[in-house]
């Protein structure tokens, strides 16, 4: 399913900040092309064609194909971090906040699977500087989840021997939803989010 179709289904994609309209159209086209064909197999001509523009028009807004991927990755990671930070800093016990963090993170990866696949699985295509920037954001994502788990351990709500390893397992579980989720499958993003929240609470030994 295309990014444009996903937007019609509910939450607005985080591309409103991209201006002018032509730059936004190119970015959305790049998301679709990268998700469908992979970064390396996609050409700038492919992207421009999807956006209904000439190849030369692309270079008015983006110097390189990598610049497009970097912009997509930055916006996507900022959104993912915002989702987790909002849940982690909210009200409630560590159990409640971890459940909300996982369910909202999973909902985003399911509902925005086209974008999420590009954001999460094309990192290695970025150059060293851009990759370092995105990795710094990933460390912040990790810190938000790890912080809630550490609070739960400290309060006695969670029984976790390896907080760092458990954090990695939780994030890996959530992110992988973007790889397999099917809009025509038996579960909605909300249902998958609720299921994964329950699974993660069991993983950390939270009391029911």
Image (spheres, helix red, strand yellow):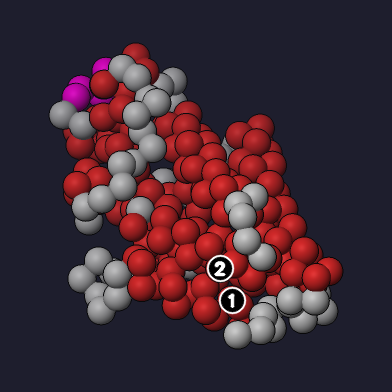
- Horizontal placement of 66 versus 111: left or right? right
Q: Magenta residues: mostly which secondary structure?
A: helix
Foreground residue among 67 and 41:
67
**Where 68 sits versus 33, above or below?**
above
Quarter of the image for the N terminus: give it. Answer: bottom left
Residue 56 pos. (x, y %): 27, 18
Q: Which residue is mark 1?
A: 200
Image quarter of residue 132: top right
Q: Secondary structure at mark 1?
A: helix
**Cα gap from disc 1 to disc 2, whole angstroms:** 8 Å
Report if the CB atoms under discs 1 and 2 are less than 8 Å apart: yes
Q: Which residues are magenta?
A: 53-58
Q: In the image, 104: left or right of 188?
A: right
Q: Nearest the camera: 74 or 37?
A: 74
Query: Which disc number belongs to residue 99?
Result: 2
Q: Residue at x 61, y 34 (%)?
A: 130
Camera-nearest label, 1 or 2: 2
Name which of mark 1 and mark 2 comes first in the sequence.
2
């Amino acid at each position: 399913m295309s990014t444009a179709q996903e937007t019609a289904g509910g939450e607005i994609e985080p591309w409103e900040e991209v201006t002018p309209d032509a730059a936004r159209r190119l970015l959305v086209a790049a998301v679709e092309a990268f998700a469908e064909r992979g970064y390396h197999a996609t050409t700038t001509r492919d992207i421009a064609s999807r956006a209904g523009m000439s190849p030369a028009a692309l270079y008015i807004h983006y110097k390189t194909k990598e610049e497009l991927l970097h912009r997509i990755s930055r916006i996507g990671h900022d959104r993912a971090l915002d989702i987790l930070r909002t849940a982690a800093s909210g009200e409630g016990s560590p159990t409640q906040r971890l459940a909300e963090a996982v369910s909202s993170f999973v909902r985003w990866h399911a509902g925005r699977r086209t974008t999420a696949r590009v954001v999460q699985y094309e990192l290695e295509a970025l150059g060293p500087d851009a990759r370092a920037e995105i990795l710094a954001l990933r460390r912040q994502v990790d810190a938000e989840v790890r912080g809630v788990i550490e609070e739960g351990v400290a309060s006695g709500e969670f029984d976790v021997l390896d907080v760092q390893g458990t954090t990695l397992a939780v994030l890996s579980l959530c992110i992988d939803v973007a790889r397999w989720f099917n809009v025509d499958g038996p579960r909605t993003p909300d249902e998958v989010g609720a299921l994964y929240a329950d699974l993660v609470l069991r993983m950390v030994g939270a009391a029911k």
